[in-house]
Amino acid sequence: MDHRHVLRALSGLLIVLFVAMISTTVVSVALPQIIGSLDGTQSQYTWVVTATLLASTASTPIWGKLADLFSKKLLLQIAIGIFVVSSVACGFAQSTEQLIAFRAVQGLGMGALQVLVQVIIAAMISPKERGRYNGYLGGVMAVATVGGPLLGGFITDASWLGWRWCFFIAVPFTLLASVMLARTLHLAEVRRPDTKVDYLGASLIAAGVSLLLLWVTFVGGDFDWISWQTGLMVGGSVVILGAAVLVEARVKEPVVPLHVVRRRDPALAIVASLAVGMAMFGGAVFLGQYFQIGRGYSPTEAGLLTIPLMAGVLVSSTVAGRLVSKTGKVKPYIVTGVVVLALGFLGLSFIDHETPLVAVSLGMLGVGAGVGMSMQNLVLVLQNTVPLSEIGAASGAITFFRSLGGTMGVSVLGAVLAHQVASKIADGLTRLGIDPAASGSGGSTLNVAAMPPQIQEVVRAAYGDATGHIFLISACIAVVGVVASLFLTPTKLRDSVDL
């Protein structure tokens, strides 16, 4: 496909990717009102998020493998159908149980859309030329990450819309993208009637990952880190995933091709992607909370304050993408990106509830620039090493590991944050001569507006001061990404779509 036809098809793909990503971030601000209007509990609040995350992460490698076996365009249309139907169902949900079930189905569609867009782009454009288009992908991801909460806050606050439109708003854009792709996307499909889908391996991977994510979701809250529940869930996950590895090593068409994952560059790219994944997920989650609870800004203001993060991703991904296409070299930009990412997190590790916003913005800019330079280029490293027949499974594998690492990172950082906040609130209330157990602030610290002014100040200071600790942990994990990227082979990207 020439540049003009690529851009026509890419416009539809970018709309699909944007809608898939924003469907998560647009709900984040509205979720308290959604659960309140449906008379839900705190555990159900968690499950509305977890159900989508579980389905999306566990199904990603399966969709990637299916893209190697069947028509990529047909699979994308099926995924769009699943996403549209489930989004409408979420909007009409009458109870939290219904919403959780529909969100799980929506997660299947979201996981499919995110990986299939990358697979189709890889099937259209050679790795060397792909760099110039990765800037568009990075920009879409940045706008979805930061613009989602802004849009969600506006929709929820608007009396003529309401929270149900957080789900409905994705439908017209997705249908528009479907029509555009039907007209503009033309791929040379290779029919492989003799192939079989590895359903056993797919089921074992989904079960093992789901059990591990369930443990990460509930540990530290419902049970301790060292407990019989932890032993049972982690041990069970290890056994199931071990069985999945044995199956993947024996079957003819594995869901996750071990011969690809075992190679030096793909393995290093996956390790580095874990660090970048945590930045992508954790940055938006905890910075938004820092601005709202630690600094007292509204959801819309918090979204505006995270613009440096979005700007960093947008500019760096565009510039780095064009330089990659011009030079054919990708390693220097990945190494620079992950180093900048680590420095950005290191800068954010010094923030507290009184840090000047300029200093916070500089740290966010560093994190955003690091993500933009490294995230899509790490996918490029992996795709450059595999033939077109394995591009789906390889892309699904790195997306899966990035999502898994980000999910676990956010959960662990959330547990650290909760512990730090509880300790700091208790100390602050004790200094004021207030019994922490009697104040009630420990049980519902997120409802800051309902607290007396004295306790509000203690809670905000606790959240503001504790946030720096989790970014210090993030900086340490980013260093792992730096080490992994340094060992990447400095190869030139190929000019052809296939090997």
Image (tube, rainbow, N blue to C red):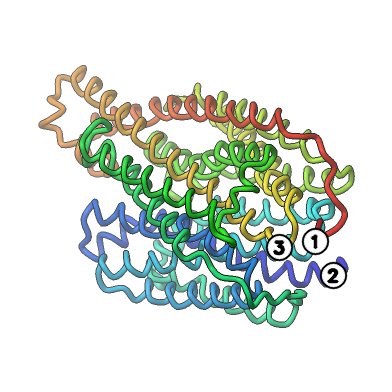
Asked if disc 1 and disc 2 are in contact, CB closer than 8 Å, the reply is yes
Q: Given the image, on which type of amino acid does mark 3 rest?
A: Ser
For the residues labelled 1 and 3, the Cα–Cα distance comes to: 14 Å
* Residue 474 higher or lower than 166, as above or below: above
The residue singled out by tag 3 in the image is 389
Decide if residue 105 is on the left or right side of residue 83.
Answer: left
**Front residue of this view, candidates 381 and 340:** 381
For the residues labelled 1 and 2, the Cα–Cα distance comes to: 8 Å
**Front residue of this view, candidates 298 and 87:** 87
Total tally of numbered discs in the picture:
3
Say whether disc 1 or disc 3 marks the residue closer to the N-terminus.
Answer: 1
Asked if disc 1 and disc 3 are in contact, CB closer than 8 Å, the reply is no
How far across and down, in percent of the image, does residue 96 sit? Answer: 26, 65
Decide if residue 425 is on the left or right side of residue 295.
Answer: left
* Residue 221 higher or lower than 350, as above or below: below
The residue at the point 76 percent across, 49 percent down is 384
**Marker disc for residue 1:** 2
Outermost residue, left side: 438
The residue singled out by tag 1 in the image is 125
Quarter of the figure with residue 119: bottom right
Is residue 325 visible in the rendered image? The answer is: yes
How far across and down, in percent of the image, does residue 498 sit? Answer: 80, 59
How far across and down, in percent of the image, does residue 315 sit? Answer: 73, 45
**Front residue of this view, candidates 3 and 399:** 399
The residue at the point 65 percent across, 48 percent down is 260
Is residue 311 visible in the rendered image? The answer is: no
Q: Given the image, on which type of amino acid does mark 1 rest?
A: Ile
Q: Which of marks 1 and 3 is in front?
A: 3
